[in-house]
C-alpha cells in the first residue's frame, strides 16, 4: 500500500495559555486531548491510512508561568515521561497515531538545580518516541536552558541526542521549536540524521509571525525546500490575554518536500489544518531528481564557518544554576551580542539596556 496518510496542525486557541494551578493544568490537557479527538474525527476518512501525525504549538499545554527559573522548576515544569505523556500515549494508542502537543517546559529530574528546557515531545502508541530540547531559545525573552550551553559541562548527548529522529511506519520524523526555524543548521542536521518529516512548533507573535515579516512560514518553507522534507508546522492561536506578552500569529501550515504549501490556517485562533503526505513520493523525489537535489549536491567540506567563527558562548555555569530571570538572561544576551559584533566589525559595540516594565515584576 502507498504510504499516504493524514497529518494535522493542532492550532490551539483561547483555552490554551498559562496554567497556574494543578486544576488548570488538567483542564489544559483535557483541551489538548479534546482537540486530538476532533482532529481524528474530522479527517480520518480523508486518506487510506487515516490521521497519523498530530502536532501542536510551542508551550501548548501550560504556557510559561513565571519569570523565575526556580519557580518554573519547582511548580510548573513537568518530567518526561510523566502524567502528560501517559495521557498522550493513551490517545496515540486509541487512534494508532503519533501525537505531539508541541513544546512544554521540562524539568530535568537528574539535576538538583533548577534547569528548565523548552522541549518538544512526540508520543506514539508505545510511549515517548523522542524528546527534542530547544537548541536556540529566543533570548532574552525566553531564557530556557539550551543543551548547547551544557556541552562543556558534560551534557549526555547519548542519552539525550541533540537532534533526535525517530523511525515510524509513515517515515522518519524529527522536529524543532519556534526560533530554531531561523537556523538552517538545525533542519540540515535533522535531515542528515535521516529525517523526512519535520514537526515544527511555535508561538511566534505579532508582528513577527504575520505578513509582511512572516518569519515562521517563510523560514519553515525554506527549511523544507533546502532539505527535501515534508513539514508540519503549527503556530499558537492564543491572544495576548492568555499568552503574554504578544498575541499569537497562528500561521500553521503544511509544506511538501519542494516547498509547496499544501494547507494553512486562516490566521490566529483555534483551528485544525489537514493535509495528506505521501512518503513514497518524497523518497522517489530524493532518489531520482537530478535538479535541486540539495542534500546530494551539498559540498559540505567547502564550508568552515561552524569551526572558525565564535558565535554564542556556551553557558556552562547553567549546570549549577540556582535561578535565572529575564533581566539576568538579557544581560548575558547583551554581552554576547556586544562581543560578537565588536569582534566582527573591529570596533566597540554597545547594546541598549532598556527592558520592559513587566520584567521588574516578581
Image: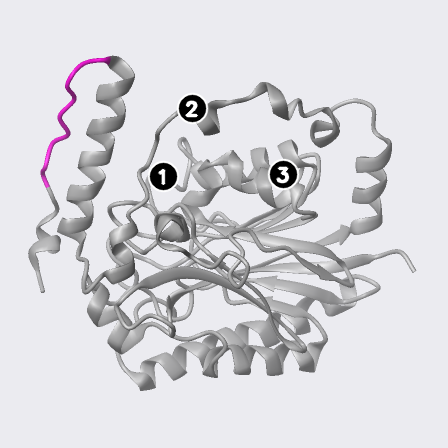
From the top left corner, tell me how far across and down residue 129 is, in percent.
62, 67
Quadrant position of residue 166:
bottom right
Disc 2 and disc 3: Cα gap in Å? 27 Å
**Residue holding disc 1:** 208
Image mark for residue 224: 3
Disc 3 and disc 1: Cα gap in Å? 20 Å
Above or below 266: residue 35 = below
Name which residue lies at 42% across and 24% down: 308
Which of the two labelled residues, at mark 2 and mark 3, occupies the earlier sequence position? 3
Mark 2 residue crowding within 10 angstroms, few (<14) / some (14–19) / many (20+): few
Quadrant position of residue 312:
top left
The mark tally for this picture is 3
Q: Secondary structure at mark 3?
A: helix
**Residue holding disc 2:** 308
The reply to whether residue 276 is visible in this rendering is: yes
From the top left corner, tell me how far across and down residue 4 is, in percent.
81, 56
Find the magenta span and give its range: 346-354
Above or below 106: residue 83 = below
Above or below 307: residue 87 = below
Q: Quadrant of the C terminus?
A: bottom left
Q: Nearer the viewer, mark 2 or mark 3?
A: 2
Tell me, yes or no, whether the highlighted magenta stretch contains residue 300: no
Q: Nearer the viewer, mark 3 or mark 1?
A: 3
Mark 3 residue crowding within 10 angstroms, few (<14) / some (14–19) / many (20+): many
Quadrant position of residue 114:
bottom left
Q: Secondary structure at mark 1?
A: loop
Image mark for residue 309: none
Name which residue lies at 60% across and 19% down: 302
Name which residue lies at 60% across and 68% down: 99
Q: Quadrant of the N terminus?
A: bottom right
Amino acid at each position: 500500500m502507498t504510504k499516504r496518510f493524514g497529518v494535522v496542525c493542532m492550532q490551539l486557541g483561547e483555552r490554551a495559555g498559562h496554567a497556574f494551578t494543578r486544576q488548570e493544568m488538567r483542564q489544559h490537557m483535557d483541551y489538548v486531548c479534546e482537540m486530538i479527538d476532533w482532529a481524528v474525527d474530522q479527517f480520518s476518512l480523508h486518506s487510506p491510512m487515516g490521521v497519523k501525525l498530530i502536532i501542536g504549538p510551542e508551550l501548548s499545554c501550560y504556557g510559561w508561568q513565571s519569570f523565575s527559573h526556580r519557580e518554573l522548576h519547582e511548580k510548573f515544569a513537568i518530567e518526561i515521561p510523566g502524567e502528560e505523556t501517559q495521557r498522550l500515549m493513551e490517545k496515540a494508542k486509541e487512534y494508532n497515531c503519533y501525537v505531539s502537543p508541541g513544546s512544554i517546559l521540562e524539568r530535568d529530574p537528574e539535576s538538583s538545580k533548577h534547569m528548565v528546557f523548552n522541549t518538544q515531545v512526540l508520543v506514539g502508541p508505545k510511549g515517548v518516541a523522542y524528546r527534542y530540547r530547544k537548541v536556540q531559545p529566543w533570548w532574552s525573552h525566553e531564557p530556557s536552558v539550551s543543551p548547547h550551553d551544557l556541552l562543556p559541562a558534560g551534557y549526555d548527548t547519548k542519552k539525550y541526542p541533540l537532534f533526535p529522529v525517530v523511525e515510524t511506519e509513515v517515515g522518519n520524523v524529527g522536529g524543532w521549536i519556534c526560533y530554531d526555524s531561523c537556523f538552517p543548521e538545525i533542519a540540515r542536521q535533522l535531515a542528515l540524521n535521516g529525517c523526512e518529516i519535520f514537526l515544527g512548533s511555535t508561538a511566534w507573535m505579532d508582528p513577527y509571525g504575520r505578513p509582511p515579516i512572516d518569519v515562521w512560514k517563510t523560514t519553515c518553507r525554506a527549511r523544507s525546500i533546502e532539505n527535501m522534507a515534508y513539514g508540519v508546522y503549527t503556530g499558537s492561536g492564543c491572544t495576548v490575554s492568555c499568552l503574554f506578552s504578544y498575541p499569537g500569529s497562528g500561521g500553521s501550515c503544511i509544506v511538501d518536500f519542494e516547498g509547496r504549501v499544501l494547507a494553512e490556517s486562516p490566521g490566529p485562533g483555534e483551528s485544525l489544518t489537514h493535509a495528506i503526505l505521501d512518503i513514497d513520493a518524497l523518497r522517489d523525489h530524493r532518489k531520482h531528481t537530478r535538479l535541486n537535489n540539495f542534500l546530494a549536491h551539498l559540498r559540505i567540506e567547502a564550508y568552515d564557518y561552524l569551526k572558525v567563527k565564535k558565535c554564542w558562548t556556551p553557558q556552562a555555569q547553567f549546570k549549577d544554576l540556582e535561578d535565572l530571570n529575564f533581566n539576568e538572561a538579557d544581560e548575558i544576551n547583551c554581552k554576547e551580542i556586544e562581543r560578537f559584533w565588536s569582534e566582527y566589525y573591529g570596533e566597540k559595540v554597545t547594546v541598549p539596556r532598556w527592558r520592559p516594565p513587566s520584567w521588574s515584576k516578581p
